[in-house]
């Protein structure tokens, strides 16, 4: 399930801030550049092929397919996937050129308005589960190519159920308040003091890649905090810090390691799991080496959090001893006694920033439900990790995750059995089976 946190308390917000934040910085993006006579259903000509191909790359970089296709469905972009939010499921639309159930009779301008400004065909506000607050950075040229590509997609007749959120979230007008607070109508502004490569990376990360949707923590009403790309809890998962911080970010990885992770879904240390495995499978694996290097350059330049390696948990606590036993009996076959794992197959646990993050959600989820890395052309045979929910108690899972966070030079806060119990509830996984059954 894709989890995106969006605005809560939006109605209150609407009342409080209306009119306060209408400032502009002179780089306002307008959709009036788009043609308002051509409709999506109008046939393309041979001369459009190059634009369609460029647009396909834009759609991949934007990962449009991930939300707009039901998992397991072969009908790309036909919608129906419910994005789960704390307020209920929001159905992603059918964005194929089907006239009745898709957006076949939308004009180019309608399309720009939806993608960059979060407006539906009749001007209604879309829910920010559609990441238009990032896509506002997409430039006119890329928007045009994206539009041409979307016109080339096979029309699919699929009526998507209406989203029914409880009051007050069912009021689309309430989104006005959210927009006033968190939506900045700023196009991408290149930084003249930085290299072309850095600017390309900034453009991709801030805009199409919408990396902040998962990697930047949200405030209680669902807007991005100022802790840009410094890690965020997604419920079952934790999207770690991806700035230049050497302890909690990607600062200790080489450029090639970051690029390899985004291209193949794994590098010598880490394996992308959960939502990041999806992002790699659907999107980042298709980016050119130049674009992945640009992303890396930009991420590395971000100052990041102040977080530093804490003192290691003492090895002789009862919890660490229990963890060592659980590890050697259940984990070392794949992850090795030195914690180095099997490169590109079973994740390395030693010196892996994701293992040491301030929030152990991804670790607990992986141990409880098991997992599978991203499947990519570069690494089609990802290893699988078995589920331990039935085999290990909450205490044992807490102990083994605390152990891997504090061995082989790793250091991070201990995990409590309570955290594991919460995750078991969230994942709807059964309790450990009594021995002998
Ligand atoms: C993280 C999930 C997500 C991603 C990624 C995403 N969308 Fe959406 N999109 C949604 C959701 C959810 C809605 C419905 C919002 C609503 O009902 O208010 C939507 C709505 C839309 C609409 C409006 C359709 C209508 O009938 O009103 C268009 C057009 C659209 N998306 C295009 C795109 C394109 C193009 C991309 C890639 C550049 C994209 N989306 C990426 C989740 C996503
Ligand atoms: C849908 C949510 C989501 C989106 C969008 C997303 N990520 Fe991630 N990302 C995650 C999660 C969750 C993890 C942790 C995966 C794990 O522990 O295996 C992660 C891990 C990573 C890591 C590895 C960090 C580490 O220390 O192991 C990198 C690098 C990364 N993401 C970069 C990006 C970039 C660049 C983008 C935008 C192009 C992006 N992510 C978009 C959720 C997301
Ligand atoms: C059969 C082999 C196997 C066994 C046994 C195994 N793992 Fe894994 N583990 C994997 C593979 C493969 C991955 C990468 C796929 C994924 O992340 O889901 C992985 C991933 C992980 C990750 C995620 C690391 C990251 O970068 O996000 C953690 C944490 C982990 N394992 C801990 C454990 C613990 C603790 C145990 C013992 C209780 C264990 N594993 C047992 C194969 C195994």
Image (spheres, rainbow, N blue to C red):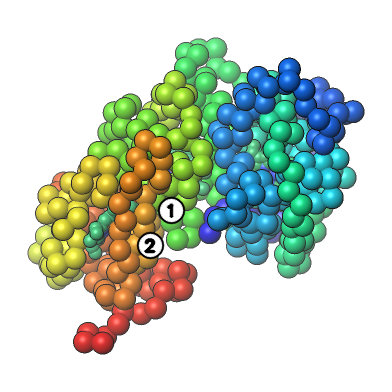
* Front in this rendered view, residue 86 or 218: 86
**Percent of width and height locating residue 174:** 78, 54
Marked residue nearer the N-terminal end (1 or 2):
1
Furthest residue in direction right, as rendered: 37
Snapshot quadrant of residue 82: bottom right
Furthest residue in direction left, as rendered: 316
**Percent of width and height locating residue 384:** 32, 56
Q: Quadrant of ligand 1?
A: top right
Q: Secondary structure at mark 2?
A: helix
Q: Residue at x 77, y 27 (%)?
A: 44
As displayed, is residue 74 above or below residue 264? below
Question: Can you identify the residue that label 2 sits on?
Answer: 365
**Quarter that holds the C terminus:** bottom left
Snapshot quadrant of residue 133: top right
CB of mark 1 within 8 Å of CB of mark 2? Answer: yes
Callout 2: few (<14), some (14-19), or many (20+) C-alpha neighbours within 10 Å? many
Q: Is residue 250 left or right of residue 281?
A: left
Question: Can you identify the residue that label 1 sits on?
Answer: 274
Q: CA distance from mark 1 to mark 2?
A: 9 Å
Q: Residue at x 52, y 19 (%)?
A: 199
Badge nearest the viewer, 1 or 2 = 1
Q: Residue at x 65, y 35 (%)?
A: 135
**Observer able to see residue 200:** yes
As displayed, is residue 363 above or below residue 188? below
Q: Secondary structure at mark 1?
A: helix
Q: Is residue 28 left or right of residue 328?
A: right
Look at the numbered disc 1 and say if its residue's Cβ is closer than 8 Å to ligand 2.
yes
Snapshot quadrant of residue 45: top right
Q: On residue 263, which mark appears? A: none
Look at the numbered disc 2 and say if its residue's Cβ is closer than 8 Å to ligand 2.
no
Q: Residue at x 51, y 42 (%)?
A: 282
Q: Is residue 334 left or right of residue 370?
A: left
């Amino acid at each position: 399930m894709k989890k995106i946190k969006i605005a809560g308390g939006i109605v209150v917000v609407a009342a409080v801030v209306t009119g306060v934040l209408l400032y502009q910085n002179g780089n306002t993006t307008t959709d009036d550049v788009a043609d308002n006579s051509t409709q999506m259903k109008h046939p393309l000509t041979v001369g459009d092929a190059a634009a369609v191909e460029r647009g396909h790359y834009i759609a991949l970089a934007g990962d449009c397919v991930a939300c707009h296709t039901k998992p397991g469905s072969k009908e790309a972009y036909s919608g129906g996937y419910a994005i789960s939010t704390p307020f209920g499921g929001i159905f992603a639309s059918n964005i194929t050129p089907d006239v009745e159930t898709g957006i076949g009779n939308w004009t180019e301008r309608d399309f720009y308005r939806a993608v960059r400004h979060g407006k539906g065909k009749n001007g209604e506000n879309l829910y920010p589960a559609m990441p238009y607050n990032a896509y506002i950075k997409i430039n006119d040229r890329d928007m045009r190519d994206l539009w041409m590509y979307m016109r080339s997609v096979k029309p699919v007749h699929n009526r998507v159920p209406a989203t029914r959120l409880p009051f007050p979230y069912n009021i689309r007008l309430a989104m006005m308040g959210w927009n006033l607070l968190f939506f900045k109508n700023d196009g991408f502004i290149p930084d003249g003091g930085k290299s072309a490569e850095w600017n390309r990376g900034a453009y991709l990360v801030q805009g199409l890649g919408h990396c902040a949707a998962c990697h930047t923590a949200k405030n209680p009403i669902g807007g991005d905090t100022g802790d840009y790309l410094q890690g965020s809890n997604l419920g079952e998962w934790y999207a770690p810090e991806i700035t230049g911080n050497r302890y909690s970010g990607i600062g200790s990885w080489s450029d090639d390691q970051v690029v390899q992770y985004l291209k193949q879904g794994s590098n010598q240390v880490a394996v992308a799991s959960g939502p990041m495995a999806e992002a790699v499978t659907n999107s980042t694996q298709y980016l050119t080496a130049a674009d992945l290097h640009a992303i890396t350059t930009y991420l590395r330049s971000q100052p990041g959090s102040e977080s530093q390696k804490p003192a290691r948990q003492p090895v002789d606590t009862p919890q660490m001893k229990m963890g060592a036993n659980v590890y050697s009996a259940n984990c070392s076959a794949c992850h090795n006694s030195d914690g180095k794992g099997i490169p590109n197959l079973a994740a390395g646990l030693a010196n892996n920033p994701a293992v040491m993050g301030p929030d152990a959600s991804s670790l607990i989820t992986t141990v409880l439900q098991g997992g599978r890395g991203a499947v990519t052309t570069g690494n089609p045979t990802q290893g699988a990790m078995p589920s331990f929910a039935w085999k290990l108690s909450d205490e044992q899972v807490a102990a083994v995750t605390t152990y891997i966070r504090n061995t082989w030079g790793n250091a991070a806060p201990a995990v409590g059995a309570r955290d594991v119990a919460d995750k078991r509830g969230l994942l709807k996984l059964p309790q450990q089976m009594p021995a002998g059954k």
